[in-house]
Image (cartoon, helix red, strand yellow):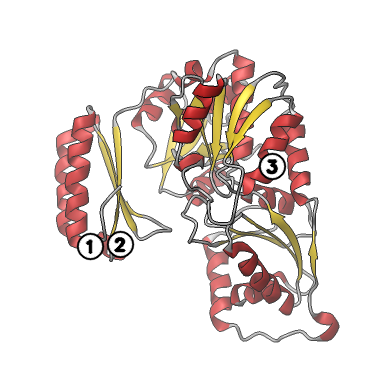
Amino acid sequence: MSIGRALGRASGARGMVLVGRDTRRSGPMLESALAAGIASAGADVVLGGVMPTPAVAELVARDERFTNGVVISASHNPFPDNGIKVFGPDGFKLPDDVEAALEALIRSDDGGRPIAGEVGSITRWDDAVEAYRAGLVQRFPLDLSGQRIVVDCANGATVTAAPAVFRALGADPVVIGAEPDGVNINVGCGSTHLDALQASVVAEGAALGLAFDGDGDRVLAVDGMGAVVDGDQILAILALWLNGRGELPGPAVVTTTMTNLGFRRAMAEHGIEVRWTDVGDRYVLAEMREHGFVLGGEQSGHLINLASGPTGDGLAGGLMLLSALAERGLTLADAAAVMTRMPQRLVSIRVERKGDLGDASEVWDLVRTHESDLGDDGRIVLRASGTEPLVRVMVEAPTSEQCEKIAAGIAEAAGRALGLVGGGH
């Protein structure tokens, strides 16, 4: 309610806010409270129902009547979590200063309350996701006739978009993870659990498989042999494709510190600059917008192509990948071979005090010792998760054994310093 009232006040009288959500059981509850808060502050609310996060961003950017967009989702996080993502009228996530101002309004919550005819309305837009689907089909006029593609919707928001889009383009999709019951989002399916997709691709003899996360802003792939193609590899394929078309300004691509060093080496071989940012799509996007780049993303499959849309879009990313393969006449396995991944190990540990990581000197001393030993042949990234009570350790080294040993040692030290809760994963 407080977030809704703050957003309504920020939108101004007769502002209009598009609200979408994923399939979590808590979604309708939060949607009702949020919408009531917005309307109580005098702005109008348009409920789009279950729809991917990028659908809300795109529709807000497309229609000047919208002053903001909101998505109720915890994305790839487990079912008990939920969250609220806010987009500006341009479809981009809010800059830090605008977000801070909105948080100040939430804390104060002392604005005047409209009454009578000044109260905002709440209406439903039943065809909102159809408008998003139509836009994708228009932007990516692929002929997928006869192609067997496995699509894993993570029991999440893309159930309303992905199957219909692939059928509209002529594909013969095998759809899994498409029976949401309110509690099974991201459970054993989607981009965080690829085993089901791998098995289905092999069993169906499909050309490839695509897996989305709960709110549809990420995509990972599986080739025809069942091998995983992660976000780094997809980004490499797209970068080479766009560069070959003369559509990669720079030429440069923006990634985060978690991106595999093999990606950087592959791009260097083709004369493409790699810009690094902190982990998080907002930092990737900020770098892209500041310097006029169009392509960026994360290893997790969060891919941004500003020529296509204002935020990470798993379905658009999958269609871009299919476009690149079709134009270059390659299988996914052949295209992914452009990049040789360095051995990498990512360990996440649940801790009591992730905020104290910066002061854990004994942990950072250990990191520096290993970094000195690795030199240019490896890399270590240690950070606190932005959305969960986790600390993540990523290690790249010449061998998998080195990765495992170094990551385990740092994770153990971090657990001692920050109060380990349960085991790592």
Relative to 372, residue 361 above or below:
below
> The residue tagged with tag 2: helix, strand or loop?
helix
Specify few, some or many for label 1: CA neighbours under 10 Å numbering under 14, 14-19, or 20 or more.
many
**Structural distance between the alpha carbons of marks 1 and 2:** 6 Å
- Per the model, the C-alpha gap separating discs 2 and 3 is 37 Å
Query: What residue is rendered at 67% in x and 70% in y?
Result: 32
Answer with mark 1 or mark 3, whichever residue precedes in sequence: 3
Q: Identify the mark at residue 100; answer none if there is no mark.
A: none
As drawn, 159 above or below 374: below
Say what secondary structure mark 1 lies in: helix
The tag earlier along the polypeptide, 1 or 2, is 2
- The quarter holding residue 248 reads top right
Disc on the earlier residue, 2 or 3:
3
Residue 374 against residue 23 in the figure, above or below: above
CB atoms at circles 2 and 3 under 8 Å apart?
Answer: no
Of residues 259 and 180, the one nearer the viewer is 180
Whether residue 233 sits left or right of residue 359 in the image: it is right
Q: Residues within 10 Å of mark 2 (few under 14, many from 20)?
A: many
In x, y percent, where is residue 298? 46, 40
Can the viewer see residue 226 in this picture?
A: yes
Type of the residue with mark 1: Leu
Q: Amino acid at mark 3?
A: Ala
Separation of marks 1 and 3 at Cα, in angstroms: 42 Å
**Quick one: label 3, few (<14), some, or many (20+) residues within 10 Å?**
many
Q: Is residue 310 visible?
A: no
Disc 3: which residue? 161
- Number of marks in the rendered image: 3
Residue at the image position 14 percent from the left and 36 percent from the top: 373
Q: Which residue is mark 1?
A: 418
Comparing labels 2 and 3, the label whose residue is closer to the camera: 3
Frontmost residue, 31 versus 85: 31
Q: Which mark is residue 354?
A: 2
